[in-house]
Amino acid sequence: MLEELTGLFSVDPPAVERVTVIRAEGPVFCAGVDLKERDSNGMAGSSGGIETMLDAVQNYPLPVVAAVQGDAIAGGNELALHCDLVVAVSTARFGMSLAQIGLAPSWFLAKKILEVCGPVVAREMLLLGDPLPSARMAHLGLIHRVAEPAEFDDAVSAVVTRVAANAPLSLRAMKSVLTRQMTFRDGIAHDDVDELVDAARFSSDAKEGIAARLDRRTAEFRGE
């Protein structure tokens, strides 16, 4: 899925297109990378494929709307917040539960949380790890709109129709301006931060945290 999304968002859209929508099927928008897959492949939190995909979405020439019909957790939260506008159902939750399983977000992933949420909510989302209801996300100005389940499709359609009615060249220019101006943190030296993140990802605590989440039990972290 990561490869397919990356490919789709790495190709210039046809001139007739105005806006792109990311939506999912089922009760969950996206719960992040499969922990069983991570564990079996020895990938204690590898984020390279996720970062490549999110970068493609963020830099796509057209506005991207996330239609969040269910929980958006970890990589799913990042996917939603890398879109330009988010319309969420009232029952959806957004969160970064990495600290609860012994992992840590990369510089790239943490940067987006800080950009969108600001330092206070970013600390809450990352340090506590508990999901935030979509209503609170909207109240804080972190997502565009919340709708009740029966009105969700109409709400998404209304936002998409409104964006598509605007001038195409203006939309592309504005998307480029906003994206470029938010890349200033990329140039900050962070090799030492990367080392801390990797230490957490490949730690015994990370293995324990993933195993505990899969077993639906409380993790016993030892700081190792």
Image (spheres, helix red, strand yellow):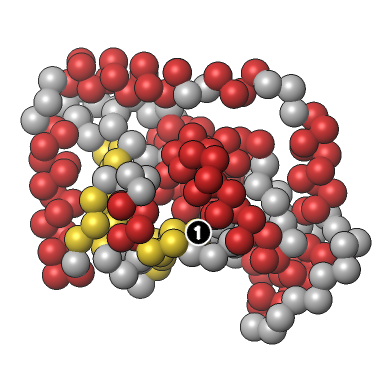
The residue depicted at 45 percent of the width and 18 percent of the height is 181
The number of numbered badges drawn on the structure is 1
Q: Report whether 142 appears left or right of 123.
A: left
Question: In front here: 17 or 72?
Answer: 72
Quadrant housing residue 101: bottom right
Residue at (11% x, 40% y) in the render: 161
Q: Position of residue 151 (x, y in %)?
A: 13, 64
Q: Residue at x 66, y 77 (%)?
A: 214
Q: Amino acid at mark 1?
A: Gly
Residue at 35%, 58% (x, y): give it.
136
Point out the residue furthest to the front here: 120
Q: Which residue is mark 1?
A: 95
Picture quadrant of residue 208: bottom right
Location of residue 170 with respect to 153 vertically, above or below: above
Left or right for 182, reference 221: left
Q: Is residue 80 left or right of residue 47?
A: left
Any part of residue 4 in sight: no
Q: Dot 1: what SS?
A: strand
Q: In x, y percent, where is residue 155? A: 15, 54
Q: Position of residue 63 (x, y in %)?
A: 28, 32
Q: Does residue 201 appear in this view?
A: yes
Nearest the eye: 110 or 13: 110
Q: Nearer the viewer, residue 39 or 101?
A: 101
Residue 28 falls in image quadrant: bottom left
Q: Taking 27 as reference, is 21 above or below it?
A: above
Q: Residue 144: x, y in percent?
A: 27, 45
For disc 1, the neighbor class at 10 Å (few under 14, some 14 to 19, many from 20) is many
Looking at the rendered image, the quarter that the C terminus falls into is: bottom right
